Amino acid sequence: METRRLGNSDLELTVIGLGCWLMGKSDWHDVDDAESVRAIHAALDGGINWLDTAEAYGGGHSEELIGRVVAERGRDKVIVATKVWAGNLTAEGVPAALDKSLRRLDTEYVDLYQIHWPSSDIPLNETMEALAKVQQEGKIRHIGVSNFSVEQLREALQYGPIVSSQPPYSLFFRYIEKRGVPFCREHNIGILPYSPMAQGLLTGKFTRDWRPPSDDNRRSNLLFQEPTYGVALDEVEVVRQIGAKYGKTPAQTAIRWMVQQPGLTSAIVGARNEAQVKDNLGAADWELAPEDVAALSAAGDKVMATLPEGNEEVNMWDWS
């Protein structure tokens, strides 16, 4: 699989990475540990070389499953990225949280350690200093951030180097294109978009009468609210039609669109089982024609037109 350099780091990431939020189980339905482990193996067997997780995914459960697989396959065979939660961003909290992640991951170091969400209470310079210290100790190789606005990215760079930004981004959720992507390209920060399939919307498997269960995180997702949801389902049919020209599924087509966007390093794609991983791998090693990229973008524009105007935040969820 094609690889790309992550920002100014020495990490070469495949253009698709495996997102392991699902494997934490706490925010999702019908997730089985044995299936999750098989999914991780299938991703690595299929050419994916990096895994993205977080201490917050099931209270570390996702990290534990990854640790089992990495121990079996060999630490040098897998690039591991994890995240520290917003409540653990103090000078004492960062190393304590990292040590717990390292134990769960069964490793002595993390390749990419990311701030999961910015904190409104803990000064960013304190967090960056703590991250620099554990980096000097050899416990992490590189520092990244997730869910940061352009202003927060700019502030972080005042206190030290960051190699990556992980925002929500998909054909249907494209706020970062206006300011986030240009800023990251200017400062050589790799972009690792999560939810490139819009939390499943772009798989083409949802129906108009489907609604997320009460404990499913998609219940608060802006894309699953009307009128956005109905428009998105209409535009998925455009994705389906374009993908059919290449013999590809809507999911493969949506991921491919993402991979071909300027400035992006690797799309973080989640999966709950081996079959989904294998389907997602079909997004690699082919090209959408420029006119089809444009047609897909136009379909996405129609969905974006239903979302709040002028929103430059990175949050897909309405928790009010």
Image (cartoon, helix red, strand yellow):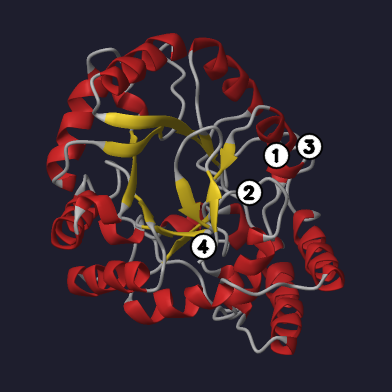
Can you say whether 247 is above or below 27 in the image? below
Residue situated in front as seen by the camera: 183 or 196: 183
Q: Gap between marks 1 and 4, in whole Å?
A: 21 Å
- The x, y position of residue 27, in whole percent, is 34, 56
Given the image, on which type of amino acid does mark 2 rest? Leu
Residue situated in front as seen by the camera: 169 or 235: 169
Residue position for label 3: 310
Q: Do the residues labelled 1 and 2 touch (CB within 8 Å)?
A: yes
Q: Gap between marks 3 and 1, in whole Å?
A: 16 Å
In the image, is 207 to the left or to the right of 219?
A: right
Q: Which residue is drawn at 20% across and 56% down?
A: 70
Residue position for label 2: 264
**Mark 2 residue crowding within 10 angstroms, few (<14) / some (14–19) / many (20+):** many
Question: Which mark sits nearer the N-terminus, 1 or 4?
Answer: 1
Question: Which mark sits nearer the N-terminus, 3 or 1?
Answer: 1
Question: Which mark sits nearer the N-terminus, 3 or 4?
Answer: 4
